[in-house]
Amino acid sequence: MTGAATAARARAVTGAGPAIAIAGLVKDYGSIHAVRGIDLEVQRGEVFGFLGPNGAGKSTTIRCLLDLLRPTAGRLEVLGLDPQRDGVRVRARLAYVPGELRLPDRLTVAQLAESFGRLRGGFDPDRRAALAERLDLDLGRPLRDLSSGNRRKVALLLAFLPEAELLILDEPTSGLDPLMQHVFLELVSEARAAGTTVFLSSHVLSEVQRAADRVAVLRAGNVVALGTVEAIRGRIRQRLEVWFEGQPPAEALRALPGLTAARLDGDRFSAVLGGPIQPVIELLARHPVRQLLVQEPDLEEAFLDLYEEDA
Amino acid sequence: MMAARTELLRIPLRALRRAGVAWSVVLVLIIGATVAFWPAFQGATSIDQIFDQLPNGLVKALGLEDFATPAGYLRGNLYELLIPLLLAGAAVVMAAGQTAGEEDSGRLELYLAQPVSRVATLLGRVLAGLAWMVVVGIVVLIGQLAFDAIVGLRIDTGLLVATVCLCTLLGLLHGGLAVAIAGWLPRPSLVIGISLVVAICGYLVGALFPLSDLLAPWRHISPWDWALGGDPLVNATDPWRFLALAGPAVLLVLVGLAGFARRDVRAA
């Protein structure tokens, strides 16, 4: 065994070092470059958001971490181990929710949980019952009868049941109603409190920003931004719409820093805000405002700046 | 660890239950329907006289020699083509479904994300398919013996056991081919298509090559010739024939395992 491998195993045992370390990860499918050289580290015990639009390379990266895909180049370490060489030991310590969820139709929820329990060396039936109740999931129902939202809940049940050291969740809340999204955030928060590392991929900014400590933003196979949620949010545009009582203060509005696409339309002013919001609020406070709307942009729009910076 | 391995076998065993039962029922029905007509053909030398008017090679190629004898009747109607081909179909469809089919549908991914190795996962599926093929083979044998007893078709049990065993092994060889392809190429339609084309070509080589003096020596490249070339319903089977089918089947599975351990797992 090499010195590096010995050190990696020692770290794995002691729990030191990052939960996930990705260095120069490249994954090509023929001429398609799905991941073009990702470097990032996820610390133990942190909730890490992995954001990007569909096709950015999130699932490809995750599937490399699970050794479902073999990287074209680069080094991966999960919980101090090489996922390709020590795949079974790595996967014994993590739980995963796939983005595209396909379940065996003929089993009931309880049977599937038991089957996965046997694959993982046992499970706690009390915890299964408690999780099923929180997720409002009927354990006796056959999987083929479940709606896509309920199937998603089954995936969450399977992920949170084993109390793994690392949770890798690929778009875990797509198809869940707001109530269940709330339950999910609670489960993530409890997992974090118990010391679990959570790697949470999503194309929805609001989902990640409520749960994550740090975020990496992916675009076309590259990390285009990496930092705390606050730092990333500060770099994201917001859509601003104001309806004034009477004539808007056109000159003062145009002089505001960080505004683009500014438009005056009668008593309505609209713009995209890329800078600090404080000067806007100060200006508006001095004028009679009938209505104010600051909208959360969708991901493509929100990260336009990041993408343009990257380009 | 042991519980995980047992589970990797239990999952495909359960998933293949319907297929295993369905193939067994179909085969038994075909055997029953065929054997039911035996009393009408028994000792009917006129049938053999009709076949005698056909070119000898053609009669042989179609397995229609001695049609009025029990061995000739069963060979011509069931064990020359139908039973081995259906057993090959069963093995190929079950193998493809549990490997390339499950992978292509995305259901395999959730299992491979658990603390199990790819080789153990695929091997569990291969062994489950093997177990079901053994069940189907035993059902064929018992069904044949039962129907024979009912209509009074007298055939040596030992020869019949060897014949069903050879047919099952021939099926397993094609199932092994399906695993070999699926190990490298997770496309179920391609896996089934190639394996069945190979099975049909093997039959044609075994049946038609002997008609040509030029091609006759090449009939031995066909697994059908290894399985049935010794006329197992009439003659005792040489042990090498069993090994000639089982050995390559195991090798093909190993080829599939090697491919599956190496490549990317297909996403849903």
Image: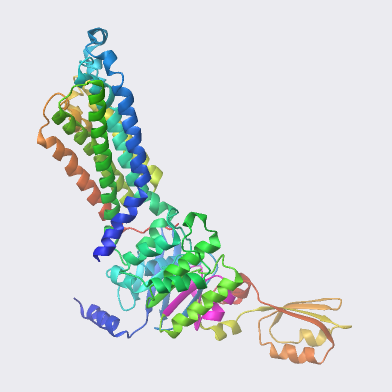
Name the quarter where the N terminus of chain A is drawn: bottom left
Q: Is residue A60 magenta?
A: no
List x then y, in percent, for residue A297: 65, 74
What are the residue bounds of the magenta stretch?
Answer: A197-223
Residue at figure coordinates x 37%, y 68% from the top left: A66
Q: Is residue B144 left or right of residue A130?
A: left
Name the quarter where the C terminus of chain A is drawn: bottom right
List x then y, in percent, for residue A252: 80, 88
Query: From this viewpoint, is residue B194 visible?
Result: yes
List x then y, in percent, for residue B147: 26, 26
Quadrant of residue A288 in the image?
bottom right
- Pick the front one: B211 or A127: A127
Quadrant of residue B137 in the image?
top left
List x then y, in percent, for residue A205: 58, 75
Query: From this viewpoint, is residue B212 visible?
Result: no
Q: Is residue A212 magenta?
A: yes
Quadrant of residue B40 in the image?
top left
The answer to whether residue A95 is above or below residue B206 is below
Question: Furthest-front residue in view?
Answer: B150
Question: Furthest-right residue in view?
Answer: A246
Residue at figure coordinates x 28%, y 39% from the top left: B136
The answer to whether residue A112 is above or below residue A1 is above
Please count the marks in the image.
0
